[in-house]
């Protein structure tokens, strides 16, 4: 399985399956509607709970709605599952583990900076 990471927003990775309908909350996140994105992604995760692009996007939505602990848990959840190759907008390919690790490090930096 290979997915396309579509954008970076506020230090969080947004992922979407290549050529798929927007079931990943990407459009809502890109529009800044994080609450709607979270609802969309939560519904999709009931069907596909282990898909890393859903977990990564939900982490981004949770982070932007103040649910830092939930975002952290999702990033860690990605790291507990097998790595998936993700195409980045610049043409690079990163594993879902790399993306989650970057998300966690940004989350930690943001959390420390606000204390």
Image (cartoon, rainbow, N blue to C red):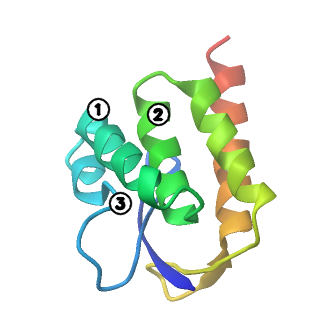
- Foreground pick, 93 / 21: 21
Where is residue 68 shown, x and y percent of the image? 58, 26
| Residue that numbered label 1 is attached to | 35
Pointer 1: residues within 10 angstroms few (<14), some, or many (20+)? some
Numbered disc 3: secondary structure: loop
Where is residue 11 shown, x and y percent of the image? 52, 47
Whether pointer 1 and pointer 3 mark residues with C-beta atoms closer than 8 Å, the reply is no
| Residue that numbered label 3 is attached to | 24
- Foreground pick, 53 / 13: 53
- Give the CA distance from mark 1 to mark 3: 13 Å
Earlier sequence position, callout 2 versus callout 1: 1
Q: Quadrant of residue 10?
A: top left
Earlier sequence position, callout 1 versus callout 3: 3
| Residue that numbered label 2 is attached to | 62
Where is residue 87 shown, x and y percent of the image? 52, 83
**15 relative to 38, above or below:** below
Numbered disc 1: secondary structure: helix
């Amino acid at each position: 399985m290979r997915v396309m990471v579509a954008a970076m927003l506020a230090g969080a990775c947004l992922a979407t399956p290549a050529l798929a309908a927007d079931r990943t909350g990407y459009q809502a996140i890109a529009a800044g509607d994080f609450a709607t994105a979270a609802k969309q992604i939560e519904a999709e995760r009931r069907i596909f709970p282990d898909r890393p692009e859903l977990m990564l996007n939900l982490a981004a939505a949770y982070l932007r709605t103040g649910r830092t602990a939930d975002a952290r848990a999702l990033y860690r959840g990605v790291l507990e599952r097998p790595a998936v190759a993700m195409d980045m907008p610049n043409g690079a390919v990163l594993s879902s583990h790399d993306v989650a690790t970057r998300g966690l490090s940004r989350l930690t930096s943001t959390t420390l900076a606000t204390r």
